[in-house]
Amino acid sequence: MRKLSRDDKKLKESQRSSYNQRHRAREQNSLDSGALVWITDLDRQGTIVQEVAPRSYSVQTFNGIIRRNRRQLNVLPGSSGELEESDQLPDLPETTPEESGSEPIETTNSTITR
């Protein structure tokens, strides 16, 4: 009887592993209260209020509080939605062909500047 139970558990674990590998199933991180998220089915953002059940969250939106599965929620990169100072691109001065010292090259179809 014990051998049958042990073999059954081994078979079920093998099936679970094969299914998860075949369907690329993976664990998702839990979300903290106050985290800004993008709600994929509504195409709008919201704020996590609380975790209601495993993989289920209450989300505050402009229209009220809704409940969504973790799969439908994507964490937004920053709370303000702006780039951080280190992520911003540097300001580059605009240059014209005259300033860069290159001359236009004539071709049959158009002018190319090197």
Image: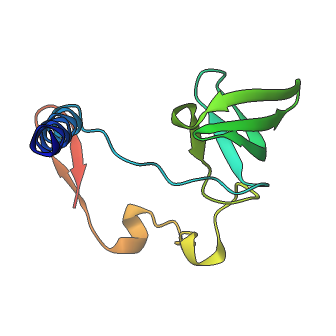
Q: Is residue 65 above or below residue 70?
A: above
Figure coloring: rainbow
Residue 3 in which image quadrant = top left
Q: Residue at x 58, y 28 (%)?
A: 40
Q: Is residue 21 above or below residue 80?
A: above
Q: Give the position of the C terminus as an image quadrant.
A: bottom left
Q: Which percent across, then down, holds residue 11? A: 12, 37
Q: Give the position of the N terminus as an image quadrant.
A: top left
Q: How many marks?
A: 0
Residue 81 in which image quadrant = bottom right
Q: Which percent across, then down, holds residue 64? A: 89, 27
Q: Identify the residue at the far bottom of this view.
A: 86
Asked whether, in this view, residue 9 is left or right of residue 29, the answer is left
Asked whether, in this view, residue 94 is left or right of residue 77, the answer is left
Q: Nearer the viewer, residue 37 or 15?
A: 15
Q: Identify the residue at the far front of this view.
A: 1
Q: Nearer the viewer, residue 6 or 77?
A: 6
Q: Nearer the viewer, residue 19 or 101?
A: 19
Q: Residue at x 36, y 73 (%)?
A: 100
Q: Which percent across, then down, holds residue 98? A: 40, 67
Q: Which percent across, then down, holds residue 43? A: 64, 25
Q: Residue at x 67, y 60 (%)?
A: 78
Residue 110 in which image quadrant = top left
Q: Nearer the viewer, residue 37 or 32?
A: 32
